[in-house]
Amino acid sequence: MLCPFCLSDDTHVYNTRPTKSAHQLWRRRRCLECGRHFTTYERVDMSFLQIGDQPYLRTRLYQSVLGCFAAAADQLRYVDDIVDQIETRLVRQPNTEIAKPTLITLTLETLQPVSQSAWLQYLAKYQPPQSEKALERAFKKHS
């Protein structure tokens, strides 16, 4: 790890802890060259996952979840934790190629206990029904 102050690669980790959500590691480091201290965060590299024919990108998932909280701005603080939970479930899938409907289902299952309005927004956007009956079936399936 390069020191952000002097760019030396001679650093020492002297404190490591899981973050509150336990999806990343918090590390406190000291540069052995300039003596300054800095913090880094470490998370699993998810680049091995494919969603359909696209590489997995956390930002894409984050934006899709964030967009569903427009009507529930008081719950925006949950977005990072929700994405972390979804990623944990993605990593536990038996294959590295994940079908888009599987991602949608995992996201809906993760959103539902947190925010009913965000869950409905996501359901409407990513599983658009062809008819009113289809919407009722989708609502019953996920509720």
Image: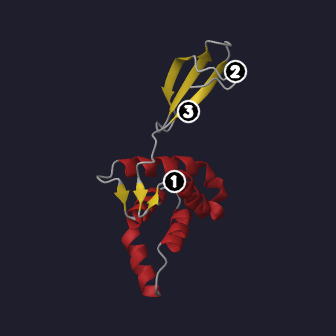
The residue wearing badge 1 is 57
Which is more N-terminal, label 3 or label 1?
3
The residue wearing badge 3 is 41
In the image as oriented, which residue stretches furthest toward the left?
94
Q: Nearer the viewer, mark 1 or mark 2?
A: 2
User: Is 132 rendered above or below residue 32?
Assistant: below
Q: Are marks 2 and 3 in contact (CB under 8 Å)?
A: no
Which is more N-terminal, label 2 or label 1?
2
Q: Nearer the viewer, mark 2 or mark 3?
A: 2
- The residue tagged with tag 2: helix, strand or loop? loop
Instruction: Give residue 84's position: percent from left, percent from top.
Output: 48, 46
Q: CA distance from mark 1 to mark 2?
A: 31 Å
* In the foreground, 78 or 104: 104
Residue drawn at the location 49% of the way across and 36% of the way down:
24
Amino acid at the residue labelled 3: Tyr
Which quadrant, please, contains the C terminus?
bottom left
The residue wearing badge 2 is 6
Residue drawn at the location 58% of the way across and 16% of the way down:
10
Amino acid at the residue labelled 2: Cys
Which quadrant, please, contains the N terminus?
top right
Instruction: Give residue 40's position: percent from left, percent from top.
Output: 58, 29
- The residue tagged with tag 1: helix, strand or loop? loop
Which is more N-terminal, label 3 or label 2?
2
Q: CA distance from mark 2 to mark 3?
A: 19 Å
